Amino acid sequence: MPITSKQILHILEEYKDLFRIRGMRVTVFVNPSRSDVVDLGKKVVRFLAVANTKEVYIWDGLAAVHSEVFNELGIPYHGIEIMGYKFPTDVLYGIADAERGSLKMVNSHPLEFTLRSDRGDADNIKLFTELTSHDWRWVDRYVQGTQDYVDDIIKIFKKA
């Protein structure tokens, strides 16, 4: 009997790992299902969306910051260092509100950082350009409004 798309989806939506970060237990889900979001039981969720693997990782937004989970997951780093911080150019850092089992995009610090920073800084512009060059529509399956958020940030950037 051939495997169905629903079975494949179930395999892709999985519990990833449990990490101890700064003494706190942090549960991370990959390609989260509605029940994963409910099980997490948090209103604020942080996420990483990895462009080349099409994986979304979510966890309690108060338990760990993006760079900590990024490092624990061992995601290959391709990016830019700005003011001592490493920013991947193929991974979208985001914050989402969780409500009734769904996630809604609220913020992406690297994108908004670029808007708030010295716009003449070549590294900030390169980070912004590389992050926004990716098609993030696939993330909407897990975090609603991600591509709309990115498109809105691009419009603001072009107006400034």
Image (spheres, grey):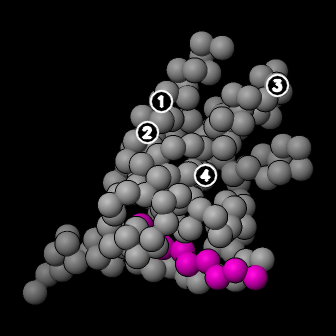
> Residue at horizontal 45%, vertical 71%?
41
Instruction: Give the numbered dot on residue 118.
Output: 3
User: Dots 4 and 3: beta carbons under 8 Å?
Assistant: no
> Which element carries disc 2, helix, strand or loop?
helix
- Residues in magenta? 23-31
Q: Could you tell me which quadrant the N terminus lies in? A: bottom left
User: Dots 2 and 1: beta carbons under 8 Å?
Assistant: yes
> Which element carries disc 1, helix, strand or loop?
helix
- Where residue 46 sits, quadrant-wise, is bottom right
Marks 1/3: CA–CA distance? 21 Å
Q: 132 or 78, which lies in front?
A: 132
> Residue at horizontal 80%, vertical 34%?
123
- Where residue 20 sits, quadrant-wise, is bottom right
Rendering coords of residue 95 (x, y %): 56, 51
Instruction: Give the numbered dot on residue 147.
Output: 2
Marked residue nearer the N-terminal end (1 or 3)? 3
Q: 143 or 131, which lies in front?
A: 143
User: How would you rate the neighbour count of disc 4 (Cα within 10 Å): few for under 14, some for 14-19, many for 20 or more?
Assistant: many
Marked residue nearer the N-terminal end (4 or 2)? 4
> Which element carries disc 4, helix, strand or loop?
strand
Marks 4/3: CA–CA distance? 20 Å
User: Dots 4 and 1: beta carbons under 8 Å?
Assistant: no
User: How would you rate the neighbour count of disc 2 (Cα within 10 Å): few for under 14, some for 14-19, many for 20 or more?
Assistant: some
> Residue at horizontal 69%, vertical 51%?
88
Residue at the disc numbered 4: 93
Furthest residue in direction bottom, as rendered: 1
Rendering coords of residue 143 (x, y %): 41, 52
